[in-house]
Amino acid sequence: MKKTIIILATVLLASFSSSIIAAGDAEAGQTKSATCMGCHGLAGNSAIATFPKLAGQG
């Protein structure tokens, strides 16, 4: 019985958290990434050694 309750609670919590993670705001992401592009470049590959390359670090 206790094992069933734990499994049920885990499944229930996982279903709620996945819907929260799935909700995103693409416009907000573009606005925030525009700030980074100034130093790190359009594709995340900075030509200046002062600013590290961000491409591929996801």
Image (cartoon, rainbow, N blue to C red):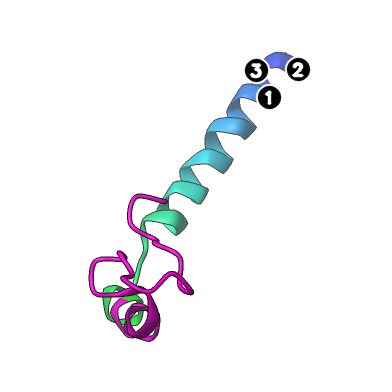
Tell me: 10 left or right of 38.
right
Please identify the residue farthest to the right as the structure is shown: 2
Q: Are marks 1 and 3 in contact (CB under 8 Å)?
A: yes
Quadrant housing the N terminus: top right
Q: Is residue 51 magenta?
A: yes
Residue at image point 61% right, 32% down: 10
- Residue 50 location in percent, x, y? 48, 74
Q: Quadrant of residue 38?
A: bottom left
Q: Quadrant of residue 13?
A: top right
Give the residue type at disc 2: Lys
Q: How many marks?
A: 3
- Position of 21 relative to 52 (above/below): above
Q: Are marks 2 and 1 in contact (CB under 8 Å)?
A: yes
Residue beneath label 1, please?
5
Pick the residue in front: 32 or 52.
Answer: 52
**What is the crowding at mark 2: few (fewer than 14 residues within 10 Å), some, or many (at least 20)?**
few
Residue beneath label 2, please?
2
- Magenta region: 30-58
Give the residue type at disc 3: Thr
Give the residue type at disc 1: Ile
Q: Main secondary structure of the magenta part?
A: loop
Residue at image point 34% right, 50% down: 56
> SS of the residue at dot 3?
helix
Q: Quadrant of residue 6?
A: top right
- Residue 12 location in percent, x, y? 54, 38
Tell me: 34 left or right of 3.
left
Disc marking residue 4? 3
> SS of the residue at dot 1?
helix
Q: Are marks 2 and 3 in contact (CB under 8 Å)?
A: yes
